[in-house]
Image (spheres, rainbow, N blue to C red):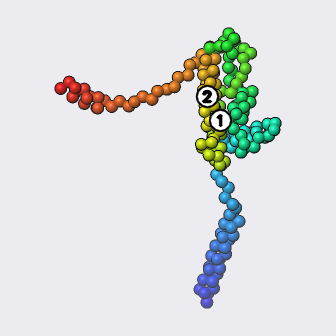
Amino acid sequence: MSAAIAKDSAEGSSRSTSNNVNDHNQQNQHPQQPPPLSRYESQKRRDWNTFGQYLKNQRPPVSLSQFNCNHVLDFLRYLDQFGKTKVHLHGCVFFGQPDPPAPCTCPLRQAWGSLDALIGRLRAAYEEHGGSPETNPFGNGSIRVYLREVRECQAKARGIPYKKKKKKKPQFKAIDEARSSKQSA
């Protein structure tokens, strides 16, 4: 009889243990939170919200479904007031000098690289929010022209010409040696 009692007691304690584990698991089963956003995704969301706020503050307000590339260009010009890159004007004595020796009164602007990255993130966000790639205002040719002009202007003002890097073609010594040996024979 003591064996039967011990068996019932063991089964009861194992049931209570498993019930406790199940209760504990049920208590901890909160809705799964999505993993934290990457730095890029966070910045893209912040940029999209900032652009949306900019459109709302226009007089009259512009909805996200009605903006065009002119609104994007105005937004990029608006952002210049928050820039941290010194862009020397043509009349400045430091125009064309990469490291000017003294401060000047030339304006601070958004750096070309920052604007280019911003447009890339906004272009992706537009498509994620249901916009079609063919009608994406952030991919409009006038935006590319504006960015190219900003890049060239800033490069001249700093005295650092921007040159597109050319891709080097891979050279294979074995192929070159085989060709030269065939030609010499």
Q: Which residue is mark 1?
A: 118
Q: Which residue is mark 2?
A: 145
Quarter of the image holding residue 31? bottom right
Q: Nearer the viewer, residue 76 or 73?
A: 73
Q: Nearer the viewer, residue 89 or 19?
A: 89
Name which residue type carries label 1.
Leu
Residue most toward the left? 185
Name which residue type carries label 2.
Val
Observer able to see residue 101 = no
| The N terminus sits in image quarter | bottom right
Q: Position of residue 22 (x, y in %)?
A: 66, 70
Residue most toward the top? 93
- Left/right placement of residue 91 relative to residue 166 reads right
Name the residue at 20% across, 24% down.
184
Vertical position of residue 48 compared to residue 172: above or below: below
Observer able to see residue 62 = yes
Name the residue at 64% across, 77% down.
15
